[in-house]
Amino acid sequence: MNQNNTVVRSGRRWVAMSVVAGWWFSACVQAGSAQIEYRQNSDYTTERNLLIETAILDDAVAFINDLFTLEQNIKIVVGTDDGPLYDPSLSEIQIPYHFYTEIIDRYGDIDNREDEQEIFANDAMLHTLFHELGHALTDQLDIPIVGKEEDAVDGLANVLLLEYYDEGAEMARHAAELFALEGEERGELSDADFWDEHSLDEQRYFSTLCHVYGSDPDRFNDLGDELGFSDDRREICEETYTRLVSDWVTLLGPALKH
């Protein structure tokens, strides 16, 4: 896993396209493509300019188009009122600017360094984009999902980061930390938290870190120690991640360029 094939620049990162379970990717004609639009909004001029300047989402769009043959166009609209969400009627991923500022504000409470806040927010935005991409691909390809779709596309977002981005583990860990911060803000659990389509923020936090550990147990042995994972839990994380990659490769087979 993680044998580099092609390397392209992605903001502060380098994106490494790799071999996953024997799939090699090459250019081919596609029916649709991912496209991005940053809407003008006088209340979020700074945020809009920062996202455009760092190009984290633009590079992700190029990555999506390099990796997938899409059934139809997927438009990523940044600066919507609602979201983050995927609207199947429009084939549109919607991400509001206020989501970006909320991430920065949450992380700002524990780290006042602006550059670190920007890195954290960019990583969380990228994970969110790949999460919503999972919904889009599930919709376009009629992918069968057993269990919660939200959990399934969380898993896909983790796989895309861990398998293709050189610093994907750090990115996934930042996404997990955002789940933890959101959980701390929630307060006491209510019935609505248990019937929500999403798993609890705390569960999403541990699941994401389980995937990080399982992607490379030797490298992330200290993470397992930090989380207090038992030997059985470490083995489960490794098996879960291996199966997760294999399952998504199988489900996305028709859409993966090879």
Image: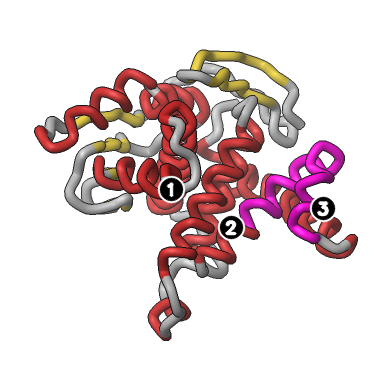
Q: Are marks 2 and 3 in contact (CB under 8 Å)?
A: no
What span is in magenta? 207-228
Which quadrant: the N terminus? top right
Residue 241, relative to residue 228: is it above or below?
A: above
Query: Can you identify the residue that label 2 sits on?
Result: 205
134 w.r.t. 73: above or below: below
Q: Is residue 174 above or below residue 45?
A: below
Given residues 106 and 149, the one toward you in this image is: 106
Looking at the picture, tell me which residue is in the foreground, 110 or 6.
Answer: 110
Residue in view at x 17 percent, y 49 percent:
81
Name the front one of labels 1 and 3. Answer: 1
Q: Is residue 155 magenta?
A: no
* Label 2 secondary element: helix
Query: Which amino acid lies under the numbered mark 2 shown in the image of this protein?
Result: Tyr
Q: Residue at x 55, y 28 (%)?
A: 257
From the viewer's side, name the closer residue of 6 and 206.
Answer: 206
- The mark closer to the camera, 1 or 2, is 1
